[in-house]
Image (cartoon, helix red, strand yellow):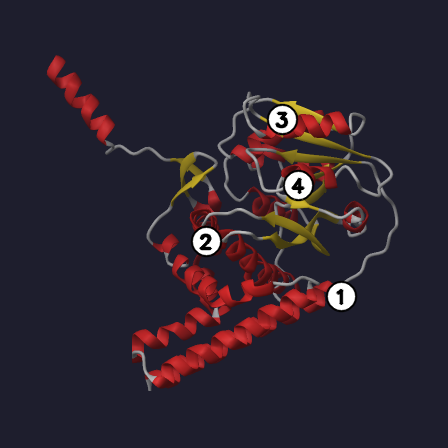
Amino acid sequence: MILWIVLFLVFMSLAVYALQVIALRRKLREEYAFINFPPISIIKPLKGLDDNLFDNLESFCKQDYPEYEVILSLQDYNDPAYRVAEKIRNKYPELVKVILNNSYSALNPKVKNMISAYKESKHDYFLISDSNVYVEPDYLKRTVSAMTHDTGLVTNLIMGAGGKTLGAKLENLQLNSFVIISVCFLDKFLKMPCSIGKSMLMRKSDFEEIGGFNAVKDVLAEDYIIGKLMHEKGKKVTLCSYIIKNVNEYWTLRRFLNRHTRWAKIRWRIAGAKYFTEPFSNPVFVSSMIFILDGFSKVSITIFIAVATIKIAFDLYINRLMKSSTGLSGILIPLKDLITGLIWFVPLISCKLNWRGNTYKIGKETKIIPYENNFSLKLIFNKLRTAIIN
């Protein structure tokens, strides 16, 4: 009986995964008409040395586009990214600005970084893009072509690129499977607005109508909230079929675990009870449950290997659709799925997270709550010392 239940769950999981792959195929077939190319301000918040940072930033300076500006925003002269930003500005002085400002109040450090850049931007259209993104010269034209009169936000599909360490390989495998097909499934089948912070194009008038950065300065998932507010205002949130590269080369395993633990906590706070359907997007993890319920028998091992093989084939097909290749990293797919399956449980027992050197608790709709450890040894020592002295 237990075996049949597990087999049913595995079948359901593979069916859901197949639907997500179909959603990706449909999304990649979408094309947009090249109508007009308004001037654009590109805002790039910088913090630390991302992999391939100079080339990433330079790719935005080589756009085949009539008129645009690139604004690199930082909070500290001592940030190692500042030297890279200066090199880019010196190479493209008529195109690039570097803004340093730490005066604005925001719990979300990325938003805090962008506020001054937004105020300095001169064009009515602006685009937010992370520093670990690399794009081809047609990126702006292809993205702007998805912006219609009733569209409030255009975002892009992302794929992982690079991968020279175990952590980076696992990150890219996750981006090029679960992440990309999930957003396509939400967009094509569930008609839910998907906004990805790696690339967001908006009009200032629409952005300010939803409250601008003040509306998202104290939430963790600012991209999701911006998309949600645009949707509630009756504006379209368009997921553009043009894929951009998220470069990940020298990640540690710990960084991979931290990233996806944070993302899982965000999804839990956004989705609520719907979060419990997420394991059905991970057939390898679902099939591993058979070892707990039935032990390591020939049947259970055979089922797990069969499911892992099918899942690898699915993911290789996804990469083929994206005109990418996993190479030998493909053998890590079952390991990645088992790890992310275990990470799924973390948000159910912890709401604390570390991001960009800050520790927070994450509340409803990813509201950021500063974390204070009232039971630290340092605090106890100070209280004891004060009591003794007095």
Residue 380: image quadrant is top left
Q: How many marks?
A: 4
Q: Between disc 2 and disc 3, whose residue precedes?
A: 3
Q: Is residue 389 left or right of residue 318?
A: left
Circle 3: is it few (<14), some (14-19), or many (20+) Cα within 10 Å? Answer: some
Residue shown at the point (59%, 42%) measured from the top left: 51
Residue 66: image quadrant is top right
Residue 219 at least partly seen: yes
| Secondary structure state at the residue bearing disc 3 | helix
Q: Position of residue 189 (x, y in %)?
A: 63, 67
Q: Please, is residue 10 above or below residue 62 in the view? A: below
| Secondary structure state at the residue bearing disc 2 | helix
Q: Between disc 1 and disc 3, whose residue precedes?
A: 1
Q: Nearer the viewer, residue 137 or 293?
A: 137
Residue shown at the point (66%, 51%) measured from the top left: 245
Q: Position of residue 193 (x, y in %)?
A: 63, 55
Q: Quadrant of the C terminus?
A: top left
Alpha-carbon span between mark 2 and mark 4 = 22 Å
Q: Tell me if label 2 and label 3 are in contact, CB under 8 Å.
A: no
Q: Position of residue 99 (x, y in %)?
A: 65, 24
Q: Between disc 2 and disc 4, whose residue precedes?
A: 4
Q: Which residue is mark 3?
A: 83
Q: Which residue is mark 1?
A: 29
Q: Which residue is mark 4?
A: 129
Q: Is residue 372 left or right of residue 264?
A: left
Q: Residue 264 — which label?
A: 2
Q: Between disc 4 and disc 1, whose residue precedes?
A: 1
Q: Position of residue 151 (x, y in %)?
A: 74, 49
The disc labelled 3 sits on which kind of residue?
A: Arg
Circle 4: is it few (<14), some (14-19), or many (20+) Cα within 10 Å? Answer: many
